[in-house]
Each structure stands twice: as structure tokens, then as C-alpha cells.
Amino acid sequence: MQNQAMSRALSGEALHGAFREEVRRFLREEYPQDILEKARAGAVLSREDQIRSQQALQSRGWLAATWPAEYGGPGWDPVQRYVFEDELDRAGVPTLQPMALIYVGPVIYTFGTEEQKRRWLPDILSSKAMWAQGYSEPESGSDLASLGLRAERDGDHYILNGTKIWTSYAQWADWIFCLARTSREERKQAGISFICAEMSSPGITVHPIVSIDGFHHLNRVEFENVRVPVDQRIGEEGKGWHYATFLLQNERLSYAHVSRRKAELDHLRKLAATLPSDFGGVMADDPDFIRRHAESEIAVGLLEKMVLNALIAADQTTPAQVSVLKIQATEIQQKITELAIDLAGRAGAVWADRARDGWREAMPLVPAFAAPAMGSYMFGRAVTIYGGATEIQKNLVWRMIGR
């Protein structure tokens, strides 16, 4: 009984009951339902959809869930924040653009000047400005510290030259925060600075990259003699690696999406009860499905407890723990997409161009659940690479354990 009580106390249901119901009511009555329908159907959301989604949340002061009250956030404790994100995932609210809210926003209010806070934070909260992240480069992916974007000092400006790649939603962005090399040092992590540039600056060119799922959200961004005022550098010159490490901790914690994984598994379980098996009966009775579904449910339950423990002990959470969370969350996501594509069977092999208007109506013979399965499966191969490849995360864990 004690274990059951503890399990329930750590589960989403038992936490902040009144607040949980308030969020559910808001999502039913105030959040744009057309955006929910698009997201649940796997359709592509426009920039305008994302802005409307964010502004609806900000109408309650809920957009920047991780921010302290003094900078415009709700000032929630970690568990209340978890409950909020839990309800968004359960309802199928599209993933908020993290580059401003989760990545650069906390860097600005933690390390930025007062002028930078006044300049950038209000526009993030109002969704007036969208941001992109300039980290990876054509020759610097997992070894990010080998980056080559140059930022050469010219009076009160930096001149940026180089290329960033895999830049999510750069085509929508008003600003980009970059890691740039301001000096050459013996230790490659030194000499890197954290610099913010307006995307409208002369010399910045965005080239689209259509990913394997048919969507355009990735880009290559080229910088050719781009002049950026020095006062758009966050923190000290040459200390950008420190700020980047701080940011990556937040980024890796954001990958869990426990409730989204729970909802996906629940959907697959119900779906399996309606699909005929090749061996008679339905797929829900298939031993292989039962085993794989149960393994994923157990893994998601353990992940939820790991996330809650990390949030509750936020100041004591180590980089190794965050790496373990990132490994577990992304591997679980891949296993669920694999289970979905297997359930879809032959129908899952049909390619759905979800980036095209009317894509669903153009596929009347393909079951609704199967249409997006292949795209989700294919792009899901990338989740163990971006944000820090699994192999790199395992090395980080090993180093911490070996000390």
C-alpha cells in the first residue's frame, strides 16, 4: 500500500488537483480548438498557428512556464510546472517553440544585462519575436566545440562569417543566438562567445532543408560579413561555452514529454484492439505486441519518476542525470514509433505529404492512424542524434561515474 501511495504521489494525477482541472478547463474552453485539431491530425502548423497558440497561453500568463515571476513567468515550483506541461501533452497541444522560451530566454535573464532583458524578454513573452538556435555547423555536430563561425571584432561590432546548419525554424525567426569563435585558444571550448543577431541583418541567408518526413523546419544559415553590435553578446567574451552548457541542460530536460508518450501508448493499445492479426483474433492479443507495449509502458513510468525527481531536486541534478534522461526519453520515443509503424502494416508504407494542404483527403483508402506513421518513424531516427547524440551522452555518464 505504501508503494502504491508513493507511486500515485509521484504520478501526474495526484499533483496539484485544482490547478490541473483549471488547465484542462482552459484547454477545453479558451485554447484555439482548430490548432488542437491540426496538431492531433499530424498536420503542419504555420507560423501564425504557433503564434496564436503561444498568445492563448500567455493570456493566462502561462507561456513561459519555467521562468521566474520577476521576468514575466508564472513563478511555479518544479512540480506545478510539470503538471502544466503534463496537461498540455495529454491534450495534444503542439510543442511550443523552445528556442526562445526554454533555451535563450533563461540565458538572457540569468546572464544578460538589464538592457538586454528589457529589450528581448517582453518580445518573447508576447510572441512578437521568434528565435532560432545557431549551434551545429557542417563540420561541427556532436563535437560542437570545434565550431568555426568567426566573430572578428571591428570597433563596437563583430563581423560574423561562417555557416550554421540544422537550424530549426530559421525561416520564421526574427533573431538567432549563435555560438561564435571570437579567439583561437589552446582549449577549443575557450574563445567561444554567445552572440545574438537579427535575422534581417545584411549578409544572413537562409537555405531550406526539407527533412525525411517531408517537412521544412530545418535550414542552413550562412553569415557573410554580418555586422553585429557588441552589446548583442550575452555575458563575457570567450565564456560562451559556459552559457551553452547551461542552455543544453534545459534543452535535454525538455525532451521527456512523458504524457505525450503515455497518450501514444494508450492510443496504440486501443487501436490494436480493432486491428485483425495475421494469426487470427486482434493485434491486442498478439504476444509480441503485448510484450513490446508493456516494455514501453514500464519504461515511460520509470522515465516519469526520473523526470519528477530531477525537477524536485533541480539544484542537485547533475549533467550525468540529465544525459540519462535524454537517452531514455529519446530511445522510448523511437520504440513507440517502431510499434506504431508495425501496427500500421502495409498501410504504414504509404507516404503522406503532410506539408501539403488537403493531404488527408487525398488518401481516402489509408486509415487515419496509418497516414502519419511513416513520417513520424523516419524523423524519429534523428531524436537520438540532435541535442547531443546518445553515444556522446553515454560518454558523459561514464565520465561522471568513473570519477
Image (cartoon, grey):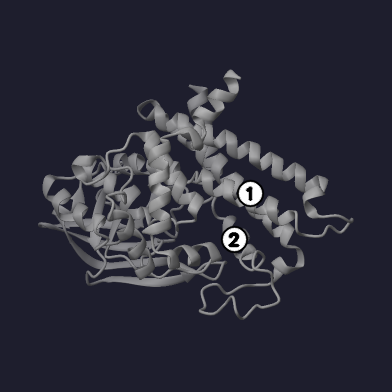
Q: In the figure, 177 relative to 314: above or below? A: below
Distance, label 1 to label 2, CA atoms, is 17 Å
Q: How crowded is mark 1: few (under 14 residues within 10 Å), some or many (20 or more)?
A: some
Which residue is at the front of the view, 304 or 275? 275
Indicate which disc residue 376 carries: 2
Q: What residue type is labelled 2?
A: Ser
Q: How crowded is mark 2: few (under 14 residues within 10 Å), some or many (20 or more)?
A: some
Q: What element carries label 1?
A: helix
Q: In the figure, 154 relative to 248: above or below? A: below
Which numbered disc, 1 or 2, marks the residue that appears first in the sequence?
Answer: 1
Q: Which residue is drawn at 52% across and 78% down?
A: 356
The image quadrant that residue 246 belongs to is: top left
Q: What residue type is labelled 1?
A: Asp
Q: Mark 1 points at which residue?
A: 266
Measuring from the top left, give residue 265's x and y in whole percent.
63, 49
Q: Quadrant of the N terminus?
A: top right
The image quadrant that residue 17 belongs to is: top left
The reply to whether dot 1 and dot 2 touch (C-beta < 8 Å) is no
Measuring from the top left, give residue 36's x and y in whole percent.
46, 62
Q: Is mark 2 on a helix, strand or loop?
A: helix
Which residue is at the front of the view, 150 or 98? 98
Measuring from the top left, give residue 61's x and y in whole percent.
27, 50
Residue 27 shows in this picture: yes
Q: Which residue is drawn at 39% across and 48% down?
A: 23
Label tally: 2
